[in-house]
Amino acid sequence: MAEVAALQIVTATSTMLFAAVATVVVAAATVMVLCGMNRYISTLLNILKRLLEPMGSTSILSALARRLEGKVALITGGASGIGECTAKLFSQHGAKVVIADIQDELGQSVCKDIGPASASYVHCDVTNELQVQNAVDTAVANYGKLDIMFNNAGIVDEPKARIIDNEMADFEKVLKVNVTGVFLGTKHAARVMIPARQGSIISTASISSIIGGSASHAYTCSKHAVLGLTRNAAVELGQFGIRVNCMSPYALVTPLAKGFVKLEDEDFENRMHELGNLKGVTLKTEDVARAALYLGSDDSKYVSGHNLLLDGGFTAVNPSFGMFKYPDS
């Protein structure tokens, strides 16, 4: 009996100690978020892990570290590139993820990698309203709600230096995917988020949303439109507790970008690093995914109508990629 009583005392003491330490850490993390010191949170959690591992409390620590626990996310263009990376990161942080794409085999493969308990796939052409509506309804049917809508699907057109060489059909195709797709995703996300009076809508824009000369006419117009729609939707949907933001990354290696620039991974990164403003680091898909994680989580609970730049100061310098240099006449 004495041994049992002693064990109960030790267990109770350990539980109380964990609760006290966890309370302090959560309070410290909250202060860090409010003060814009998010970069120190991972360090704080690592310290806590070392302290609590002897108590067998790593599972509780893991739960504390998951920033999307209990949330449901729908990601268009989730089968590859930024979308794939974000889907995997969201899942690691506790979210249920619906991947919507037209690349069925790739999308189903990503879901398999994540695991059927946390991810599902739906075929979705973002220019087709019925398919976008179905993707949103699938998320709600599978997981009971929709907390995060990530409008990530997009395309580029063949770069042509002279506007007189551009075809209207190519221009309209880019706008239909990049603008209409974001509009439809935002519309149908709002449809289910308004009754819930909460939600986060995120769209992938580009540095081309705020400067000229970094991409084609069609792509630049489309990303300016994404930013405009983001701001307008943020104004409308704020009354329902719904946040609307977009992200504007600098050039980075994705299947889409490589097809546009016609360079493979290493050559692409070297060229973009040479042209970029911030030296010594290279923008990766993981960096954009972490930005989406921030905008989807409660860490950004008072951020709306914002265009989050991931450009290393490129647009502050505002150089040009030389998109519109005419050939010698």
Image (spheres, grey):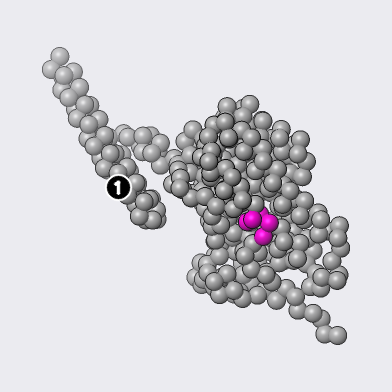
Percent across and percent down for residue 12 are: 21, 26
Q: Estimate the x, y position of residue 77 in percent, counting from the top left.
A: 68, 46
Q: Is residue 156 above or below residue 313?
A: above
Quarter of the picture holding the N terminus: top left
In percent of the image, x 67 and y 30: which residue is there? 137
- Label 1 neighbour load within 10 Å: few <14, some 14-19, many 20+: some
- For mark 1, what is the residue? 28
* Amino acid marked by disc 1: Ala
Viewer-side residue, 150 vs 301: 301
Identify the main secondary structure in magenta: helix
Quadrant in which residue 58 is drawn: top left
Magenta-drawn stretch contains 226: yes
In this picture, residue 206 sits left or right of residue 324:
left
Residue 44 in view of the camera: no
Q: Residue at 57% across / 31% down in the picture?
A: 195
What are the residue bounds of the magenta stretch? 224-228
Visible in this render: residue 229?
Answer: yes
